[in-house]
Amino acid sequence: MLELLWAPFLACLVLTAIHVYLGLHVLARGVIFVDLALAQVAALGVTVAFLAGHPIQSEAAYWYALAFTLGGAALFAASRTRRAPVPQEAIIGIVYAVSAAAAVLAVDRAPQGSEHIKQLLVGGILTVTPAEVGTLALLYAPIGALHWLVRRPLLDISFDPEGAGARRAVRAWDFVFYASFGLVVTSSVRLAGVLLVFAYLVVPATAGALLARSARGRLAVGWALGVLVSVGGLAASWAWDLPTGAAVVVAFGALLAALAVALGAGAMVRATRERGAAALRGVAVALLAAVGLAGLALTLFPRMDHLWLDWLEASAPAVRALFLSEDERETYRDSLEGVERSAAELARVRAMQREAQWGARPASPEIQERMRQYLAGRGEMLAGEQTVLRALRTRARERQRWWLGVPLLALGAGGAAALARRRRTT
């Protein structure tokens, strides 16, 4: 594992170092999607180079992307005014949409156009080489030094635009920021893809803004969380055989969601200490309304997916067994055992197949083909057992709609209405 992931991990560290700092400026300026827009402009440049006959990873494609990105940077710098009739975020959105549409039109008739779009979105960070990481670090080091030397005017423009100085000077410094930003984005998209670059730019900076007040504190928090998520995303990619870039992006989303829940819980605890149980009345109304909606959905649409009921039945199997006949219960138990056996066997053989693909387990092409055929056959058996389980679940739902759905609807709607009425009275 370490032999395969150490180079991608170093690449993630390099991305974290530069993108978290740039993300602080992006959040402060309120141009959240400038990264996506410039990344999409760079992707359009790569697409044009691809249609001109240059490979995606070639030097020519890189210079095409850089030229397009610098053009976008000049446009964004020129469009920044204090009292513009059109907000700069609107211009950024237009540039993103037009660039994305143009890229789609450009690759529509190109061979393997869908693969080209996929590579631009998710990148190929898993296959990065140490030489590529070193080149990226050597490129970003002088950019970081430049931002350190001119940090005062750039920070003033980002965090105090009203007192930043004359308009001409602001536009000049804006071009310095967007040009260096575009150079970073162009190089990062080539390595990691649009989505991963956007995640490294926005999510750690957002978490830092939620947890710290000063720019230094936000930068420290963003760097720490960026490293933590990089480790978690790469580990998840290895453990569950997931696309690496997508796994890291989802890990960033999970981190931000967990942080939001923790901050919300902390705010609720403080409000409860100050105002007592009355502070939880709004939460209780929301929970009761959710219970009522769940009951209404079960009553009206018993065949749809009810995740809360699936979770309840998994925790307490008797909830489903009560609504099945004796023969149906026996069939359900047999099918469930078949699903568990097939899932365990599929996991075992897939692990062997993954080890063979990574070179950890020697296997001839004939053995790998046999494993593929075995997985296909066992997968069909698993699908058959799951079909039986779904049919039995549908039968149970038809009976649960009256015995569970209607009472939950009455409880949720009645309780929420009573609490809301009491809150208005108070």
Image (cartoon, helix red, strand yellow):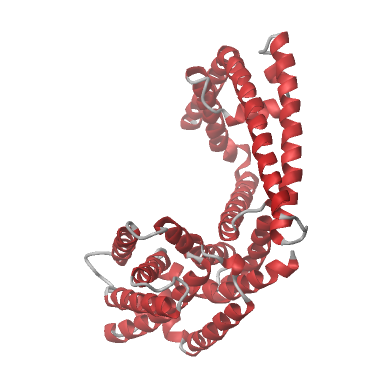
Determine whether 193 is above or below 307 in the image. Answer: below
Task: Say left or right for 31 vs 273.
Answer: left
Whether residue 413 can be seen here: no
Query: Who is closer to the viewer here, 386 or 82?
Result: 386
Residue at 69% over, 54% down: 365
**Residue projecting furthest to the front:** 366
Instruction: Residue 273 in the image: state x and y as whole percent.
Output: 65, 46
Whether residue 343 can be seen here: yes
Instruction: Residue 317 in the image: state x and y as whole percent.
Output: 73, 23
Determine whether 349 is above or below 321 in the image. Answer: below
Instruction: Residue 211 in the image: state x and y as whole percent.
Output: 59, 63
Residue at 71% over, 23% down: 335
Query: Who is closer to the viewer here, 100 or 295?
Result: 100
Location of the N terminus by quadrant is bottom right
Task: Say left or right for 9 vs 114.
Answer: right
Determine whether 387 is above or below 244 in the image. Answer: above
Residue at 73% over, 62% down: 359
